[in-house]
Image (cartoon, rainbow, N blue to C red):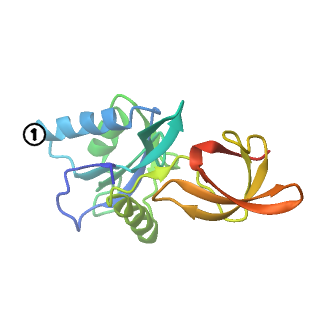
């Protein structure tokens, strides 16, 4: 998981909320909130998280690995938004809403809605599976999908995906050549989705 996690304090406190930010400013917003908390503000914010994954693609014959956000423009934040009597904690609400780059919380009006626990568990499980360091292809292919070959001896032919080898970045296709199905092994970058 390349998602930035900050301040994993009090793991049993708070609820998870979705904070809408300017796209591309997710980490900046996390740093701004974190620096305010580090300066001594006693706001009930416990954790900030930007879920990310590593993806690879080949451009101009060069394999490149980049980081892609699961949800561009959104941050997960674990905090106490409401006081024990159910009223909105105005101090934390005001601080987070007025942080540069923040557009608001997901929810209805001025009443942010926390994520349900099963949603949080699914997101964190998906993010932890990314910790293994495995790099995914930028385009996810499926068995049975028809693709167009864009490089090599079979350029402009179409084939049906029979096998996918994510570790090696290769596909096994069945291509019809002179009326006969022939297996062809290609790298991910050598094919495009058919239109």
* Residue closest to the eye, 32 or 108: 32
Examine the rendering and report whether any part of residue 146 can be seen.
yes
Q: Residue at x 44, y 67 (%)?
A: 122
x and y, in percent, of residue 121 in the image:
40, 68
**Residue name at image x 62 percent, y 43 percent:** 190
Residue at the extreme right: 179
Image location (x, y in percent) of residue 39: 11, 35
Q: Which quadrant of the view contains residue 175?
A: bottom right
Near mark 1 (Cα within 10 A), the count class, few <14, some 14-19 or many ≥20, is few
Q: Is residue 149 left or right of residue 88?
A: right
- Closer to the camera in the image, 17 or 167: 167
Identify residue for label 1.
40
Please name the residue shown 45% across and 32% down the image. Answer: 22
Location of residue 128 with respect to 24 vertically, above or below: below
Placement of the C terminus among the 4 image quadrants: top right
User: Where 108 sits versus 31, above or below?
Assistant: below
The answer to whether residue 94 of the structure is visible from this angle is no
- Say left or right for 24 vs 194: left
Helix, strand or loop under label 1: loop
- Residue 68: which quarter of the image? top left
Is residue 6 rendered to the left or right of residue 101?
Answer: left
Residue ranking furthest to the left? 40
Image location (x, y in percent) of residue 48? 29, 49
């Amino acid at each position: 998981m390349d998602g930035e996690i900050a301040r994993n304090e009090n793991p049993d406190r708070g609820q998870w909320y979705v904070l809408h930010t300017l796209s591309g400013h997710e980490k900046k917003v996390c740093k701004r909130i974190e620096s305010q908390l580090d300066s001594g503000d006693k706001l009930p914010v416990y954790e900030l998280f930007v879920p990310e994954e590593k993806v690879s693609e080949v451009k101009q014959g060069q394999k490149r690995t980049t980081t892609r956000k699961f949800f561009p423009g959104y941050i997960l934040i674990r905090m106490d938004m409401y006081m024990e009597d159910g009223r909105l904690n105005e101090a934390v609400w005001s601080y987070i809403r007025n942080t540069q780059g923040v557009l608001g919380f997901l929810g209805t009006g001025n009443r942010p809605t926390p994520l349900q626990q099963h949603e949080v568990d699914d997101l964190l499980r998906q993010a932890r599976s990314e910790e293994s360091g495995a790099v995914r292809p930028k385009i996810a292919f499926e068995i049975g999908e028809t693709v167009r070959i864009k490089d090599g001896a079979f350029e402009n032919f179409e084939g049906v995906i029979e096998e996918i080898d994510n570790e090696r970045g290769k596909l096994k296709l069945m291509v019809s050549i002179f009326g006969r199905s022939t297996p062809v092994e290609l790298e991910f970058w050598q094919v495009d989705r058919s239109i």
